[in-house]
Amino acid sequence: MRLLGALPKVTLFSFGLVLSSALLIAAEKGLPGSKPGVQLKIGTILASNQSQDFDPRLSKMKNQLKVFKYRSYRLINEEIQDVPWQANALFSIPGGRSLVVVPQEYRDRQVSLKVRLLERDKPLLDTSVRLRNRGNLLLGGPVHEGGVLILSIWAMAE
Amino acid sequence: MMRNCTTVQRSLGAWLDAELGEAERQEIREHLEKCPSCLAEKRRLERLQSALGEALRARASGIAFEPFWREVQRRISEREIPWHARFWDWVRSILYPQRLAWVVPVAMVFLVGAFSLREFFPGWLSGSQRTARTVVDSIDGHGLNVALFRESESRTTVIWLFEDHEEEDEASGSSTQGNPF
């Protein structure tokens, strides 16, 4: 304590700030892309014209869903997985379908994904996309229970 | 060097005012212990100093210093400082070396903070929209029709997969899949 007392306050404060900077830089290095994985969230939404109901769990996506002309939107499933880079993540989609997502890399604050939609063993769609970190893509079209399925594919590099 | 009474009595004033060095003080002290006439002279000087001090204190108590200091204070506060003098005072205070020492670490913290925030708010600082939207590099519908739709306001990108059901839609009068937008 005597040693600390002998140092000028400005020196101590400057040291504190430099230490804070170092911690921030370390935190920056620890941000997206430096850890071995990505968090994927797949939301399965049933869109139809059979009612006027809007699932309140989809309120955050209301603006995005406005691009469609359906009257009813219901979240029927949501699944989150932490997936290592280059590993396959399998998500079950209603109607005997499945979605396979393979995270490729994180670059320029974008998460690259390979996405494959299957109906049983038959591939329906293959696509390569780059989502902004914590951003999503909507993939829709498969018919289900008088409506269509819209899949929200969301990714966050950890 | 031994002092005689004349030199001692000449130095008594300085001795009483503590203006002499240690050696001289010691010499005079020793002389006063042995010399009654010089001791008497020393006492006379002390009485004179004391009387003068009392007279001055009595005189000073009758003088009103308060109005004098008030006037000095008023003149200081009324003194007009030109804006450029105030500006240079401010610049000098900013450029004071100890304050400058804060600039480098503060700038470092600011810059690192800005770059960190960019991770959480893509497009901020750089103004780049390039990474703010979803990019579709390739699509293969395996024989099905595929539409790619973008909406800029909500930054929505949609890949829509559909079969050609125009005939069925026309027959049923509904269109659940073919044209969702």
Image (cartoon, coloured by chain):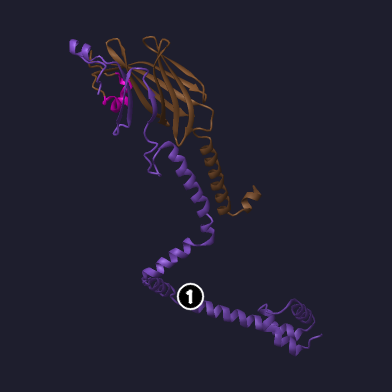
Chain colours: A brown, B purple
Between A88 and B109, the one lying in front of the other is A88
Q: Is residue B104 above or below residue A32?
A: below
The answer to whether any part of residue B43 appears in the image is no
Q: Is residue B122 left or right of residue A51?
A: right
Between A59 and B96, the one lying in front of the other is A59
Between A119 and B19, the one lying in front of the other is A119
Q: Is residue B41 above or below residue B62?
A: below
Q: Which residue is mark 1?
A: B61
Q: Position of residue B115 (x, y in %)?
A: 46, 43
For mark 1, give the secondary structure: helix
Q: Is residue A87 left or right of residue B50?
A: left
Q: Amino acid at mark 1?
A: Ser
Q: Is residue A51 magenta?
A: no
Q: Residue at x 78, y 82 (%)?
A: B31
Task: Tell me where residue B181 sits by quadrant.
Answer: top left
Q: Is residue A67 above or below residue B112?
A: above
Q: Is residue B36 left or right of residue A118?
A: right
The answer to whether any part of residue B54 appears in the image is yes
Q: Main secondary structure of the magenta part?
A: helix
Mark 1 neighbour class, 10 Å CA radius: few under 14, some 14 to 19, many 20 or more: few
Q: Position of residue A137 (x, y in %)?
A: 37, 26
Q: Position of residue B66 (x, y in %)?
A: 42, 72
Q: Is residue A58 magenta?
A: yes
Between B178 and A59, the one lying in front of the other is B178
Q: Residue at x 40, y 74 (%)?
A: B67
Q: Position of residue A57 (x, y in %)?
A: 33, 20
Task: Magenta stretch: give its range.
Answer: A55-67
**Furthest residue toward bottom:** B6
Q: Is residue A73 above or below residue A135?
A: above
Q: Residue at x 74, y 78 (%)?
A: B25
